[in-house]
């Protein structure tokens, strides 16, 4: 059972991952499930394709608090922060960050065990002005919010 | 090849706030070098944060995460001097790891 | 009047030389520099002085267009519409201060505005009956003049100390580079002034670079002041000068801080902001618990405080103009834990009505003395009014574009849409100091590049969106880039990417794939080149006399009955 997630993986890669794997054995099933990379979701092009790979178009939720800059200081380094209001959206187990107009919109997915706050900060590349999405998975259902980040040439202010 | 990760873990209220900066180029595989050759994709695929050997966060990343990636997260519990460890593995199989002790924030 | 106050007035009078006639004249103007105080919390607010130590002329815009929700409301009212909206008598001191109307004649009649020796007198007079009053500066204090550039703002640091600025935030200050900013704040200004910027963080772990707020006890009332630096500094100005610092509006952080300060017992919470007026108005509607936002950046002189409703009440929003031309006076009467009454006045600073403070006058003269010769060099004379401010163009920027085109043999010239830069009346000499008031920046290099037609369009669209995006959080302030050679049509109300059309060079349509020779300056990238002041001063010396300046104004479409646009 615990080897199932590594089926088909080359032996070399398996060995390299062995330290991660050793840690994973001690964990609840929910977290171990994360060890499988959702390759098809990462390879999807276009936000709709990402949603269809996830299996559902997420419902908009006020429970996701998504902070991204209105105007990016540097499109190569755009800070994003996802917080969850658990009173609106309980039992969040995964958080996804999507950048609408990137070649592959899915930038990152975070597996959140029960004792971890559904809260994430990272920095992503945004090639051009577009919507950024925060998607939360809770009890097998998907929820989202989005916000536009503008990528500009800069200058002339003041 | 292990590379340095800067980590800060601070107790704030009942939670431990972890911030980590990893040194990694996060190449998309779409850029070309000065000779016009495509620079191969090289990006962190998996990141794991552990607290005293328990996984408190596991992430899968694509090449759209910025170079020298930043990760911020918070978990419940944790005590001063507990060990928080961050490790990553990239698409070429390289790994990186770093750890720190929790301090009072 | 108490005996002590009377003798204090006599002392001021003696210093002024002509105090009593001065007071009498001030009474006729409708300006009251001895404004009676209200209540027990007193904040004096100035902003965007742009290092103008001496009295100057500054023409307010005839184009300050508001679109969508900002249409036909302050600050997007110009000329007669502004006078009507705020009940200001025409042909008065106040009309001249707040509008461009009948500019040349009014400037000749009412004289120069601003000046730090005049501001010093005003601050003393306002503080005389406002015990404990704080003087707040909204930023853009350390940049905009030759001496501020040449002394790396040391002149403004000395002047800030003597004027008694208690709290400030920043924007152009950052163009001195992070090292110099910290050197000043940790050195000369340490213990004299609080520099607040809750929205500036370092780029590694997101730690604050500056203090975010300060709490001061004033006449038994706990007053919290939060500082908000210009959120888009690393975009509008070179990011490489402040490498490792990140900005942003940070609305949620602000709300958390306000809530925290209230929980700590702050009875008055004020945001000293360099957001720009429209951003402040939006912010005031979304963040609750702030009593007043004292704003700057967009150089809007708004005669009254705007009352913006939000979830838990109302926030006052003010904007105090630029160039030392105005002083905002905000009083609160705080009793039984709450604000019972407030009063706001934006006082225009007329140099002829305010005697210079002798100590400040002496300091300014000492600070300027090493540079007198360079500053006073006459480069040319002008027969036309030279000004900058306006959404699309100004006559001084036109000269800069003309100089760039001619000196570099460029088909097209671009000059940034800065809102600072003083005004020269017809018949004036153009001195080196006057030129530097238009161009004194730390990244002055001139560039000459081949730019494709489609890139030219994208550049204009980009700047237009920074000015006319329906959501002020997506605007950066500043005006449209000024252009020489190129003509175009702009429709401010159109959506992003569709505002610019009919781009032409000498009557011929611009071709998307064709490269054009374009001169410019003030690139936010690291570039090498001649400083703009060398190029323009050379050109001006050759011209000797500037006759009528033909302004290259774009065709503006779709703005019928817009009260922010006088054609």
Image (cartoon, rainbow, N blue to C red):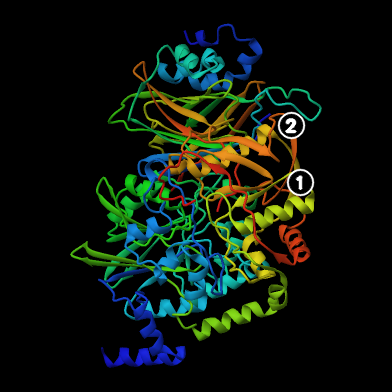
* Looking at the image, residue C325 lies above or below residue B37: below
Q: Chain of mark 1?
A: C
Neighbor class of circle 1 (other Cα within 10 Å; few <14, some 14-19, many 20+) is many
Give the residue drawn at x 26%, y 45%. C311
Q: Is residue A82 visible?
A: yes
Q: Nearer the viewer, residue B90 or B14?
A: B90
Neighbor class of circle 2 (other Cα within 10 Å; few <14, some 14-19, many 20+) is few
Provide the residue designation for mark 2: C514
Q: Nearer the viewer, residue C103 or A95?
A: C103
Question: Which of the labelled discs sits on residue C488, or is there none?
Answer: none
Q: Is residue B55 visible?
A: no
Give the residue drawn at x 56%, y 49%. C392
Give the residue drawn at x 42%, y 52%. C277
Residue C369, horizontal then vertical, whole percent: 66, 80
Provide the residue designation for mark 1: C410
Residue C144, horizontal then vertical, whole percent: 60, 63
Q: Secondary structure at mark 1?
A: loop
Looking at the rendering, in which quadrant would you find the N terminus of chain C? bottom left
* Looking at the image, residue B78 lies above or below residue C153: above
Give the residue drawn at x 53%, y 44%. C205
Q: Is residue C365 left or right of residue C380?
A: left
Q: CA distance from mark 2 to mark 1?
A: 15 Å
Q: Nearer the viewer, residue C24 or C376?
A: C24
Q: Are marks 2 and 1 on the same chain?
A: yes
């Amino acid at each position: 059972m615990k080897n199932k997630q590594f089926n088909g993986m080359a032996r070399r890669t398996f060995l390299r991952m062995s330290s991660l794997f050793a840690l994973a054995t001690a964990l609840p099933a929910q977290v171990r499930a994360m060890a499988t990379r959702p390759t098809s979701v990462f390879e999807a092009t276009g936000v709709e394709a990402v949603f269809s790979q996830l299996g559902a178009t997420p419902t908009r939720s006020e429970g996701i608090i998504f902070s991204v800059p209105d105007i990016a200081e540097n499109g190569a380094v755009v800070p994003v922060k996802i917080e969850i209001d658990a009173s609106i959206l309980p039992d969040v187990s995964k958080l996804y960050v999507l950048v609408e107009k990137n070649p592959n919109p899915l930038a990152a997915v975070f597996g959140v065990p029960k004792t971890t706050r559904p809260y994430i900060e990272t920095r992503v590349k945004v090639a051009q002005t577009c919507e950024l999405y925060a998607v939360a998975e809770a009890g097998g259902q998907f929820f989202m919010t989005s916000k536009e980040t503008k990528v500009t040439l800069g200058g002339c202010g003041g | 090849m292990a590379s340095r990760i800067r980590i800060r873990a601070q107790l704030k209220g009942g939670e431990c706030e972890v911030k980590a900066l990893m040194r990694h180029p996060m190449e998309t595989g779409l850029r070309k070098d000065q000779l016009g050759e495509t620079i191969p994709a090289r990006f962190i695929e998996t990141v794991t944060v552990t607290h005293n050997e328990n996984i408190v966060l596991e992430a899968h990343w694509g090449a759209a995460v910025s170079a020298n990636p930043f990760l911020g997260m918070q978990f419940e519990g944790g005590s001063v001097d507990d060990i928080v460890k961050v490790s990553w593995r990239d698409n070429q199989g390289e790994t990186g790891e770093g750890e720190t002790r929790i301090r009072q924030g | 009047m108490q005996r002590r106050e009377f003798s204090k007035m006599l002392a001021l009078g003696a210093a002024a030389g002509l105090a009593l006639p001065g007071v009498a004249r001030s009474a006729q103007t409708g300006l009251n520099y001895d404004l009676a105080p209200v209540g027990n919390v007193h904040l004096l607010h100035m902003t965007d002085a742009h290092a103008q130590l001496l009295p100057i002329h500054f023409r307010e815009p005839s184009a300050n267009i508001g679109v969508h929700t900002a249409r036909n409301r302050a600050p997007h009212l110009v000329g007669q519409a502004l006078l009507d909206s705020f009940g200001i008598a025409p042909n008065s001191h106040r009309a001249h201060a707040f509008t461009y109307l009948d500019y040349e004649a009014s400037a000749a009649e009412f004289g120069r505005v601003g000046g730090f020796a005049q501001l010093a007198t005003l601050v003393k007079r306002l503080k005389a009956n406002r015990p404990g009053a704080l003087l707040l500066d909204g930023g853009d204090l350390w940049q905009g003049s030759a001496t501020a550039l040449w002394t790396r703002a040391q002149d403004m640091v000395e002047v800030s100390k003597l004027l008694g600025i208690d709290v400030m935030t920043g924007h152009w200050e950052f163009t001195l580079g992070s090292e110099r900013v910290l050197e000043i704040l940790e050195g000369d200004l340490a213990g004299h002034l609080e520099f607040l910027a809750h929205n500036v963080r370092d780029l590694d772990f997101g730690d604050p670079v500056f203090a975010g707020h300060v709490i001061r006890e004033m006449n038994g009332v706990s007053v919290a002041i939060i500082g908000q630096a210009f959120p888009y500094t690393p975009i509008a100005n070179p990011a490489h000068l402040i490498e490792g610092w990140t900005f942003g509006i940070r609305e949620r952080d602000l709300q958390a801080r306000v809530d925290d300060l209230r929980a700590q017992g702050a009875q008055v919470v004020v945001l000293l902001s360099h957001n720009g007026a429209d951003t402040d108005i939006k912010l005031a509607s979304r963040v609750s618990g702030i009593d007043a936002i004292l704003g700057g950046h967009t150089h809007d002189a708004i005669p009254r405080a705007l009352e913006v409703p939000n979830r838990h009440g109302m926030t006052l929003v003010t904007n105090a103009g630029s160039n030392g031309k105005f002083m905002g006076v905000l009083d609160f009467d705080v009793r039984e834990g709450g604000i019972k009454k407030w009063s706001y006045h934006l006082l225009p600073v007329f140099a002829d009505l305010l005697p210079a403070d002798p100590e400040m006058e002496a300091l300014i003269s000492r600070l300027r003395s090493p540079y007198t010769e360079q500053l006073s060099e006459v480069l040319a004379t002008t027969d036309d009014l030279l000004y900058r401010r306006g959404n699309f163009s100004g006559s001084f920027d036109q000269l800069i574009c003309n100089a760039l085109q001619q000196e570099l043999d460029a088909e097209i010239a671009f000059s940034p849409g800065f809102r600072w830069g003083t005004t020269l009346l017809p018949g004036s000499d153009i001195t080196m100091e006057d030129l530097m008031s238009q161009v004194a920046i730390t990244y002055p290099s001139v560039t000459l590049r081949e730019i494709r037609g489609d890139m030219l369009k994208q550049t204009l669209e980009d700047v237009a969106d920074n000015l006319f995006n329906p959501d002020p959080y997506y605007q950066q302030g500043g005006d449209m880039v000024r252009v020489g050679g190129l003509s175009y049509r702009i429709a401010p109300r159109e959506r992003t990417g569709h505002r610019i059309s009919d781009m032409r060079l000498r009557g011929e349509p611009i071709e998307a794939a064709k490269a054009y020779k374009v001169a410019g300056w003030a690139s936010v990238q690291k570039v090498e080149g001649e400083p703009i002041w060398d190029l323009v001063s050379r050109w001006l010396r050759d011209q000797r006399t500037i006759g009528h300046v033909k302004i290259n104004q774009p065709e503006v479409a779709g703005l019928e009955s817009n009260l922010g646009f006088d054609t």
